[in-house]
Image (cartoon, helix red, strand yellow):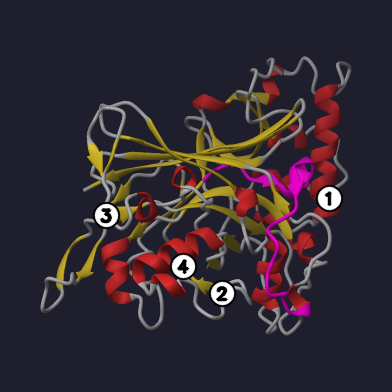
Amino acid sequence: MSPIPPNSDFTLHNLPWGIFSMPGESPRVGIAVGDQILDMSKVGEMGLFDFDTSVFYEDVLNPFMALGKEVTNGARTQVQEWLRNKDGPLTNRPDLFEDRLAATMHLPVRIGDYTDFYSSIEHATNVGKLYRDPDNALLPNWRHLPVGYHGRASSIVVSGTPIRRPSGQVKTKAMDTPEFRASQNLDFELEMGFIIGKDSTLGEPISTAEAEDYIFGLVLFNDWSARDIQKWEYVPLGPFLGKNFASSMSPWVVPLEALEPFRIAGPVQDPEVLPYLQTEGLNNYDIKLEVSITPKGGPETIVSRSNFGYMYWNMAQQLAHHTVNGCNVRVGDLMASGTISGKDAASYGSLLEISEGGKKPFLLADGTPRTFLEDGDTVVMRGWGEKGDIRIGFGVVSGQITE
């Protein structure tokens, strides 16, 4: 194993899982370690594990996750110990490692169902002020339940995949009738997603106390949004063409257990939530988030610095609400947080908020103005946690806008 660079996202405290391939080779399971990937298909061949290691030859993590947390957490802990042990079985074995920067990364899971929540009170308030009565920005149900909608999985793509500008019906206030055209208000949404690693039973809710048993790990998530298409179509049933053209996901899945050092308390929930949504302990996570825009041929500009810890509704509450009616979940299901915004403009998680619906242009580092995304713009999101000498990161999720 090569030395892990300072400030690497992929320290021994992390060890996230992903699907990678090298030129001319098939996709398989790996663990990110600094600038390298530990090829778990090769480690599996060493006979060190007491489970069926054929799962490491799969092109998705689903079969591995389905083995259960006792197995998956145990495998990660063993790898951690072996990498720290100078006399361990992975020492002086360069053949087990690949150059991470030379690898092709693939969507890490086969996503069965996708649900998007709307769980940042700052974001929901900002959007409510833009689209509705500013004095009644939050709808009456918002503080009582984690609002969400069932999306689609077919167009969720791995980081680095180009994003084609979508077209659809648009109607502005100046138009008598809608017209079909390419979206002019294309936006990003800064989100995090969690991946289900355990099947539940139809008809049996998952409690907030049980929720973490079902959450395998987390990813960065950019839920692209065509605001002009969405605004015309979303009443009464919510987002459709304005959202389902693409979402981007980071390739490395950080195990939930790796985030243990970053637990924090969430915001006070007022009014008190119903019993099935009540939680104990620290259920939010201090994960710093950052969004940048880089125009084609231009320099990068940081446009948002936020934090996953701002979420009003936490993951346990989201999963409990999702299943309280008996809806079952399956290995590989993805649930996204909804746009993550803080209290000030520097922490807003979408251009809709940053540009106040397009009314307030801002300048990139090269001096060019933006309200929404233009062709050639690349959006990059990063996320990491730091506490003492412990650092854990998610890498990046990126996408460039094309015509």
- Name the residue beneath numbered marker 2: 142
Residue lying furthest front: 135
Mark nearer the viewer, 3 or 4: 3
Give SS at disc 2.
loop
- Name the residue beneath numbered marker 1: 71
Callout 1–callout 2 Cβ contact below 8 Å: no
Left/right of residue 132 with respect to residue 271 in the rendered view: left
- Name the residue beneath numbered marker 3: 358
**How many other residues sit within 10 Å of disc 1, few (<14), some (14-19) or many (≥20)?**
some
Mark nearer the viewer, 1 or 2: 2
Give the spatial CA distance, label 4 vs label 2: 23 Å
The first of marks 4 and 2 along the sequence is: 2
Q: Residue 152 carries which label?
A: 4
**How many other residues sit within 10 Å of disc 2, few (<14), some (14-19) or many (≥20)?**
some
Give the spatial CA distance, label 4 vs label 1: 30 Å
Where does the N terminus fall, quadrant-wise? top right
Give the spatial CA distance, label 2 vs label 3: 25 Å
**How many other residues sit within 10 Å of disc 4, few (<14), some (14-19) or many (≥20)?**
many
**Amino acid type shown at disc 1:** Val
The first of marks 4 and 1 along the sequence is: 1
In the image, the segment drawn in magenta is 250-275
**How many other residues sit within 10 Å of disc 3, few (<14), some (14-19) or many (≥20)?**
some
Callout 4–callout 2 Cβ contact below 8 Å: no
The first of marks 2 and 3 along the sequence is: 2
The first of marks 3 and 4 along the sequence is: 4
Front in this rendered view, residue 20 or 363: 363
Front in this rendered view, residue 391 or 199: 391
